[in-house]
């Protein structure tokens, strides 16, 4: 029941991708053996594509341990990792740096080739990102990387990359019913250039769920970094009252289709133009049964009209992709962590 997306050349992914950020330590204690067994259950259910990153502490190694613990399931898995140099090191990124980090990911994951590497660059004023992407492409041509992608680029800088001939096949970005920034420019650009969208934040770190329906607005300390991050987006969207209206509409659609709010929110994004997959952040398998329903749900005109009747009142955010987060002095940028690659640790 899990639909798939075909990139061509024999490479397909599940349209629900198991996210890895939630396993990196900022969302509670992770028990490695249980996390590995949970990965096996996801693969058996048809969610065969895993997302991770060199900066998600311990997650590449954990997926590598899964592959070694379940050799019969490992060949069914596609792994998308990231290449994210630390902010302080952007000026010194060179050929040896790039190869060292990619080799580290290969070793941690226990693979000979990385299926997809998603490139991020913290500060475009340090103008080495095109050269760095070209080094990644050199490793693609050498067989260490299968496909190149980017994550959290704005449209102008992604255009700079494609104009330089870097073969970008996908862009991982934040995209949801609440955060429509990709619709401003990025979707059209990616459609014109054959770049597929891999979407995170679709369920707002768990805010898009029955747990938050009819609940008062959270104030003070919020449970984890995901919720802190996405509460800022809800504020920009139009505030808690408007968000509650959206949750109620999604709850009505969920009852109609026999599923839950998060699945309706994910299905709505999968139906958007240029969206290849959405990433579900899961620390366990508690929502796996709902995930398995995604392929059988078809939202009709009534569902989509009710959703639009709320989202048409959005106030924002109105910038291009990831512009807010790049302002390190602003509300969104202040919560980011910029020094997680740890390239001195092999």
Image (cartoon, rainbow, N blue to C red):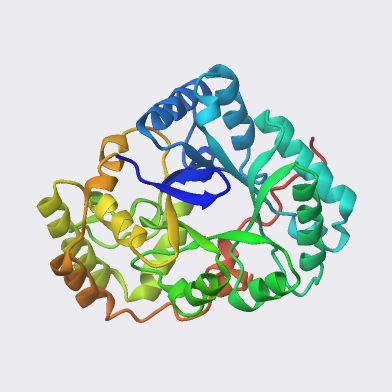
- Residue shown at the point (65%, 75%) measured from the top left: 159
Q: In the rendering, at what x and y percent does residue 156 appear? A: 64, 79
Residue 149: name its quadrant.
bottom right
In the image, 214 versus 346, the foreground residue is 346
Can I make out residue 224 in this image?
Answer: no
Could you tell me which quadrant the C terminus lies in? top right
Relative placement, left or right, of 310 versus 138 is: left
Task: Give coordinates of residue 133: x percent, y percent.
Answer: 76, 60
Q: Which quadrant would residue 74 be assigned to in this image? A: top right
Is residue 26 shown above or below 31? Answer: below
- The residue at the point 71 percent across, 53 percent down is 339
Q: Is residue 156 above or below residue 128?
A: below
- Asked if one can make out residue 260 in the rendered structure from this viewpoint, the answer is yes
Residue 244's place in the image compared with 31, above or below, is below
Q: Nearer the viewer, residue 210 or 74?
A: 74
Q: Depth check: give the residue in front, 221 or 89.
A: 89
Q: Residue at x 72, y 69 (%)?
A: 123
Left or right relative to 81: residue 332:
left
């Amino acid at each position: 029941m899990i639909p798939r997306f075909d990139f061509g050349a024999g490479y397909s992914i599940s349209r629900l991708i198991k996210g890895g950020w939630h396993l990196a330590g900022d969302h509670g204690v992770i028990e490695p053996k249980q996390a590995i067994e949970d990965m096996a259950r996801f693969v058996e259910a048809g969610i065969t594509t895993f997302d991770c990153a060199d900066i998600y502490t311990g997650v590449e190694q954990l997926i590598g341990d899964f592959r070694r613990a379940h050799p019969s399931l490992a060949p069914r898995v596609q792994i998308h990792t990231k290449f994210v140099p630390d902010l302080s090191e952007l000026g010194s990124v060179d050929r040896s740096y790039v190869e060292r980090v990619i080799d580290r990911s290969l070793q941690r994951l226990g693979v000979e080739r990385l299926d997809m590497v998603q490139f991020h660059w913290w500060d475009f004023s340090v103008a080495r990102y095109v050269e760095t992407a070209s080094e990644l492409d050199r490793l693609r041509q050498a067989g260490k990387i299968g496909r190149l992608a980017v994550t959290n680029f704005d449209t102008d800088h992604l255009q700079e990359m494609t104009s330089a001939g870097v073969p970008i096949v996908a862009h991982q970005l934040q995209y949801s019913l609440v955060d429509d920034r990709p619709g401003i420019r990025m979707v059209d650009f990616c459609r014109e250039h054959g770049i597929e969208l891999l979407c995170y934040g679709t369920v707002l770190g768990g805010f898009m769920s029955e747990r938050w329906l009819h609940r008062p607005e959270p104030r003070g300390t919020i449970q984890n970094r995901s919720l802190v991050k996405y509460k800022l987006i809800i504020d920009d969207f139009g505030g808690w009252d408007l968000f509650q209206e959206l949750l109620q509409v999604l709850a009505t659609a969920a009852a109609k289709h026999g599923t839950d709010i998060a699945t309706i929110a994910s299905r709505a994004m999968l139906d958007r133009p240029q969206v290849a997959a959405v990433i579900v952040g899961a620390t366990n398998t508690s929502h796996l049964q709902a995930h398995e329903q995604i392929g059988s749900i078809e939202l009709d005109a009534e569902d989509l009209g009710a959703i639009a009747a709320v989202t048409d009142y959005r106030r924002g955010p109105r910038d291009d992709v990831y512009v807010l987060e790049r302002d390190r002095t602003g509300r969104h940028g202040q919560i980011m962590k910029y020094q997680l690659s740890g390239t001195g640790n092999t």
